[in-house]
Image (spheres, helix red, strand yellow):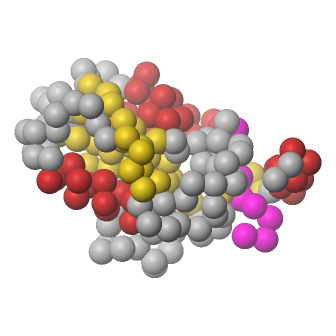
Amino acid sequence: MDIQHFNEVLAEADLLISEEQIQKALASMASQIDSELADEYPLLLCVMNGGLMTLGHMVPNMKIPHEQDYVHASRYGDATTGAELKWKARPTVSLKDRTVILVDDILDVGTTLLELKKYCEAEGAKSVKTAVLVDKQHDRRVDGITADYVGMPVEDRFIFGFGMDYKGAWRNLPAIYAVKGL
């Protein structure tokens, strides 16, 4: 792909969620986590790369003490459709007896989050919760997985921006867009 293609995709894309809406949603998620886990010392595991923006913008709104680490497992790479889960990095801290929150950009089909949740449980986590900025609205979920903390629902389109990429690009955008025609 060349820069011209990426610029054309952005120029033709539909703005779905503004920067202001995202920041309000992240503040609301942080408040909900603070309220529900006030007596805990949770471990927030950022699901790389997509969850980086969500975690980075959500945690300044949190009031409770917590620990952070990351996991890097992907089904997409630079592709637009998912494949087998590939591990790139596992957490460096122990999950045993911890309340773990997997923080990601999107809950789509849910295969990645489900596998990561199973991994955390197998590592001895006391409980595993999920926090996603957007929850894609469709009926293709695996095993009925849902997110515990959701910023907002989003329509069933190919979206990018705010951590989500289009063929590796545009994770840096402060808003969320949908590819024209997808």
Q: Nearer the viewer, residue 143 or 122?
A: 122
Residue 125 placement, left or right of 15: left
Q: Nearer the viewer, residue 19 or 132?
A: 132
Magenta part of the chain = 173-182
Q: Is residue 80 visible?
A: yes
Residue 64 placement, left or right of 8: left
Residue at 27 percent across and 31 percent down: it is 92
* Residue 179 among magenta residues: yes
Residue at 43 percent across and 22 percent down: it is 60
Q: Position of residue 129 (x, y in %)?
A: 26, 49
Q: Residue 124, relative to residue 85: is it above or below? A: above
Q: Residue 127, relative to residue 180: is it above or below? A: above
Name the image quarter holding residue 116: bottom left
Residue 1 placement, left or right of 21: right
Residue at 75 percent across and 61 percent down: it is 179
Q: How many marks?
A: 0
* Residue 33 among magenta residues: no
Q: Is residue 7 visible?
A: no
Q: Position of residue 173 (x, y in %)?
A: 70, 38
State the predominant SS element of the stretch in magenta.
loop
Residue at 63 percent across and 61 percent down: it is 79
Q: Nearer the viewer, residue 30 or 90?
A: 90
Residue 102 placement, left or right of 181: left
- The image quadrant where one finds the C terminus is bottom right
Q: Position of residue 50 (x, y in %)?
A: 52, 44
